[in-house]
Image (cartoon, rainbow, N blue to C red):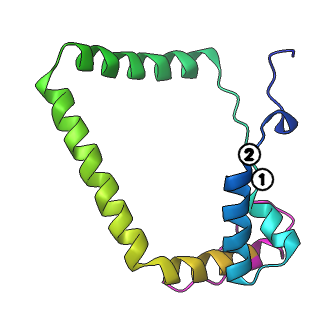
């Protein structure tokens, strides 16, 4: 390997792919549209970005090792965030599926990979 990570090098799990395909089927998407859900993005970070990311992670680890009360607060907030996210996902699952389906339909009408607000008429 030459240090460059390619799309072929990133493999999904069978379980994850099955979940994506079942969700796509429940949305009524074609196989072509469902394959969009399985695409992976590879982001190559420059040295400065890698260093910034590593510094951030290292400071969090250092705070944990020092039993810092701020780290304990951060853990607590992250747990609350996850609970709230699950509650929102449960409450708005149907609307989220509908919106995702509209975005995917809109993506097929443009040459760009990015959803176009005009083509993916999403209600607000």
Magenta stretch encompasses residue 114 = yes
Residue ID for mark 1: 39
Give the residue displayed 74% in from the left and 45% down from the top. 12
Q: Which of marks 1 and 2 is in front?
A: 2
Query: Dot 1 surroundings within 10 Å: few (below 14), some, or many (20 or more)?
Result: few
Give the residue displayed 24% in from the left and 18% down from the top. 63
Residue 122, position in %: x, y?
59, 82
Most prominent secondary structure in the magenta stretch?
Answer: loop
Task: Looking at the picture, tell me which residue is in the foreground, 65 or 51.
Answer: 65
Quadrant of the rendered image containing residue 21: bottom right
Give the residue displayed 74% in from the left and 84% down from the top. 28
Picture disc at residue 30: none
Quadrant of the rendered image containing residue 98: bottom right
3D distance between C-alphas at marks 1 and 2:
10 Å
Residue 52, position in %: x, y?
47, 20
Task: Looking at the picture, tell me which residue is in the foreground, 49 or 82.
Answer: 82
* Residues tagged 1 and 2 counted as in contact (Cβ below 8 A): no
The N terminus lies in quadrant: top right
74 shown above or below 77: above
Residue ID for mark 2: 12
Question: Would residue 119 be seen by someone viewing this image from the given angle?
Answer: no
22 shown above or below 27: above
Magenta stretch encompasses residue 115 = yes
Q: In this view, does 40 lie to the left or right of 88?
A: right
Question: Would residue 111 be seen by someone viewing this image from the given angle?
Answer: yes
Task: Looking at the picture, tell me which residue is in the foreground, 26 or 70.
Answer: 26
Q: Is mark 2 on a helix, strand or loop?
A: loop
User: In terms of sequence position, does the residue under pointer 1 or pointer 2 come before the other?
Assistant: 2
Give the residue displayed 27% in from the left and 48% down from the top. 79
Q: Is mark 1 on a helix, strand or loop?
A: loop
Q: Tell me which segment is drawn in magenta.
A: 105-124
Residue 41, position in %: x, y?
73, 44
């Amino acid at each position: 390997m030459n240090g460059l990570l390619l799309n072929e090098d990133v493999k999904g799990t069978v379980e994850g792919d099955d979940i994506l395909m079942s969700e796509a089927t429940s949305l009524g998407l074609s196989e072509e549209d469902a394959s969009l859900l399985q695409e992976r993005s590879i982001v190559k970070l420059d040295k400065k970005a890698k260093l910034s990311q590593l510094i951030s992670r290292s400071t969090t680890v250092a705070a944990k090792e020092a039993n810092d009360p701020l780290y304990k607060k951060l853990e607590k907030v992250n747990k609350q965030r996850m609970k709230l996210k699950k509650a929102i996902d449960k409450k708005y699952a149907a609307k989220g599926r509908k919106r995702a389906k509209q975005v995917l339909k809109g993506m097929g009408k443009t040459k760009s990979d990015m959803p176009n607000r005009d083509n993916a008429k999403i209600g607000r």
